[in-house]
Image (spheres, rainbow, N blue to C red):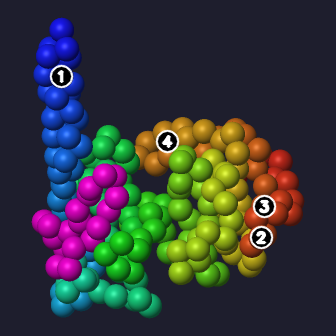
Amino acid sequence: MEMRFRILSGALLMAAFSAHAAPNPVTVFSCAYWDKSTDNVEKLDKCVEVKDGKLKFLPALFAKTRDVEGMSWVGLYDYMRAAGLMDADYYVRSPESYLSVVHFDNGPDWFVEGLVRSRQNGKVGYWDDNFRNRIAPQFDYGWQFKEGRALVCNGCKPQKDGEHTALVGGEWFYIDKSGQKISDVKSGPF
């Protein structure tokens, strides 16, 4: 009996060690990027590695992409579609410094009044150009800032309108750059 226990314990330890020691697979995805030599959107087949759910942008991207104020735009459409998610755009500073931004009007959201929108865990928030969160992701949707305020909504729902999507219902209001509610809107304008 004791011998069986030792054999079984040894087998379990070997299986656990093998499972623990097995390398985590790395998956490589393509991306869209703005090419500095052609000044067009191009596709790079080996753009980003994904390991343990973390992205690492590859050196080939930085050799080709157009850099604007220390950032490059990258569209990770194949990666997102493989995960069953909607298209996503990123601003990238280095292989491991990046920010997912709202995909808007066929491309990445842009910085307006120093802030850009990002969707995190299903909610929209605002980040600065150093990828620091300035207004926590807490809104179902939010527009870009204009003259120091942004229109946001909670409880609004997307509704298809031909090839476009409108947002209906919910509570609509304006926020300031600190994220504080500054005025209500009686009904959603979109």
Q: Which of the 4 image quarters holds residue 84?
A: top left
Q: Which residues are magenta?
A: 41-60
* Distance (Cα) linking label 1 and label 3: 68 Å
Q: Quadrant of residue 94?
A: bottom left
Q: Nearer the viewer, residue 100 or 3?
A: 3
Tell me the distance, in whole angstroms, between the alpha carbons under discs 4 and 3: 25 Å
In what element is the residue under mark 4? Answer: strand
Query: Is residue 145 found inside the magenta-colored segment of the image?
Result: no
- Circle 2 is placed at which residue position? 178
Q: CA distance from mark 4 to mark 2?
A: 33 Å
Q: Earlier in the sequence, mark 4 or mark 2?
A: 4
List the residue tagged with mark 1.
6
Say which of 125 and 55 sits in front: 55
Image depth: mark 2 or mark 3 in front: 2
Q: Which is in the foreground here, disc 4 or disc 2?
A: 2
Residues packed near mark 2 inside 10 Å, few (<14), some (14 to 19) or many (20 plus): few
Q: Evaluate if marks 1 and 4 touch, with contact meaning CB atoms under 8 Å apart.
A: no
Residue that badge 3 annotates: 174
Residue 50 locus on image (x, y percent): 26, 57
Residue displayed at 66% across by 41% down: 156
The residue located at (19%, 55%) in the rendering is: 26
Residue type, label 1: Arg
Could you say whether the residue bearing mark 3 is in a helix, strand or loop? Answer: strand
Q: CA distance from mark 2 to mark 3?
A: 11 Å
Q: Is residue 32 visible?
A: no
Disc number lying in front (1 or 4): 1
